[in-house]
Image (cartoon, coloured by chain):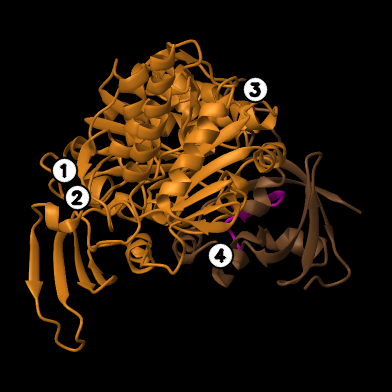
Chain colours: A orange, B brown
Amino acid sequence: MSIAETSLPLEQAVGQAASLPLKIVRDATCTFCGCVCDDIDLTVEGDKITKAKNACVLGKSWFFNHHIEDRPEATIEGRPVSYDEAFDAAADILLSARYPVTYGLSDTTCEAQRVAVAITDWIRGTVDTTTSVCHGPSGMAFQSVGEVTCSLGEIKNRADFLIFWGGNPAESHPRHFTKYSLMPVGEFVPNGRKDRTAVLIDVRKTKSAKAVDYFLQIKPRSDFELAWALRALAKGLSVDPSIEEATGIPLKTLEEVMEGMKQAQFGAILFGMGLTMTRGKHINSEAVLALARDMNRHTRWVAKPMRGHGNVTGADNVVSWTTGYPFGVNLNRGYPRFNPGEWTTSDLLGRGEADAALIIASDPMSNFNQPARDHLRRIKSIVLDPKLSETAKVATVAFTTSVYGINTAGTVYRMDDVPIPLRPAFDSPFKSDFEVLKAIETRIRQHQLAGRERC
Amino acid sequence: MPTEFILIPGRTSRHGTSLNEGKYSDTYQSEINTLLMNPRDMARLELVEGDCVRMWNRVGEVVVSVKSGKDELPPGLLFITYGDISSRLMGAETHGSGMPDSKGLDVLVEKLVEKVS
């Protein structure tokens, strides 16, 4: 959808210093991180964003560094081609594959995600998202112990005790502290920061440590033990003082923290990938989710993962409401099956099983383990990305796409599962992920339906 | 003599801003190629900022430059910004979770005598 087709709160004006038309986009949405701040006022000069009021350092960098690049719209084996030629080649690859995997999807719109799932269904492939190497273990933990949850608005208005665990929001989600959790004035916390107690649990004394009241610097790989010690204290059980040797945190400190947790009116544990990426993974997340559940015997507590990519939460939602499972979904038998470790992309590639890949807005050639990278280099792949990446370089068919939220409208989900519309700033000559995927899907269906008619 | 450490790959503010400039920008490449180390460990290994070390485990090997982690890191713990370099030390085993061990990696480190360009 182009800007002209949207009913957005745009104000047109004539540029003063430059001859380029000046445009203000009010309440634009930043899609750099899972905070998905939707109160950014953008000043747009031609195809450049020159001001991003309210944006954090990461948001400013996101808005200022995405302009129209001088790149071909598509390539096949590195050779510039037309969109139509690339659509045909992409459809051929996917139709010929016996075990294709669709991967990425956390930096694109829900509308594009939905088409990607549909393509995977038509070709009986596997659909997986970057969640599997992010909070996928937390997704598994939700299924095991459930999730006591809430919106970020509730945390802003109610939370008087916050635990940040295995994350560094000061650097990864800079506005989380100021807009949603630690600092803002809320209905039941009228004095903002003064009404809140904050704890950080981490192996590193990060910049976030300066913002909290208690910093618990735990030993590496001891999150599970610490969470279970707190669970025991929550249930009134005795904990052996040797917990200090295991976790680095004295029992007395844990007892003090637990007392504060019990006294709170509304507590929230906000946990990061320090839990999910470390040995234990889903059982670390399970332990923290179970702790929040246990605390509800005393007072209101919730636990929420801190999500990284701008629409990784949307990917979880879209894949869930289309297949019933959040990631790592195999559709080969015509119905969805879920099995992390089997149908997650790192495993499929690392074991050399997938024979083709459709990768949307992700760069596994830079971020995956070496065996997975080696296999991805060997198989045919189709890559959609606004910027050149190592993954795009090895792609059989590569598409340059427009940037969601800057050039493309659509819907994304904030980390608390709240859907938010995008208000793009300027048009791009490149097609959106949605348009590219829809064209590939159309060709796949034409081919499949023609084959059915011949039968 | 190689020294054992635990490596924590993770994201930083500079990683986020330079990522938007592009993964081929000097800033991004410098960010993902720099290893943070406790000052006492640096002294023990006779390292000064800018020195290069070889870091490896059973999966892979990388060469990175060293910077003081000041009081952010306790002795024995290293930090590197998540990216191509850190992922070379990541194994394919996910223990049925889909997630490879990506933080808390056991690594060995030794000082490189020769500077690497």
Asked if marks 1 and 3 fall on the same chain, the answer is no
Could you tell me which residue is drawn at 25 percent across and 61 percent down? A427
> Residue at label 1?
A189
**Mark 4 or 3, nearer chain start:** 4
- Hey, what amino acid is under mark 1? Val
Horizontal placement of A82 versus B78: left or right? left
CB atoms at circles 2 and 3 under 8 Å apart? no
> Residue at label 3?
B95
Mark 4 against mark 1, which lies toward the viewer? 4
B95 shown above or below B25: above
**In the image, which residues are magenta?**
B70-81
- Hey, what amino acid is under mark 3? His
B33 shown above or below A233: below
Horizontal placement of B91 versus A419: left or right? right
> SS for tag 3?
loop
Pick whichever, A378 or A131, lies toward us.
Answer: A378
Q: Residues within 10 Å of mark 4 (few under 14, many from 20)?
A: many
> Residue at label 4?
B28
Where is the C terminus of chain A found, in terms of image quarters?
Answer: top left
Pick whichever, A271 or A252, lies toward us.
Answer: A271
Q: CA distance from mark 2 to mark 1?
A: 6 Å
Mark 1 against mark 3, which lies toward the viewer? 3
Asked if marks 4 and 2 fall on the same chain, the answer is no
Quadrant in the rendering for residue A378: top right
Q: Residues within 10 Å of mark 1 (few under 14, many from 20)?
A: some
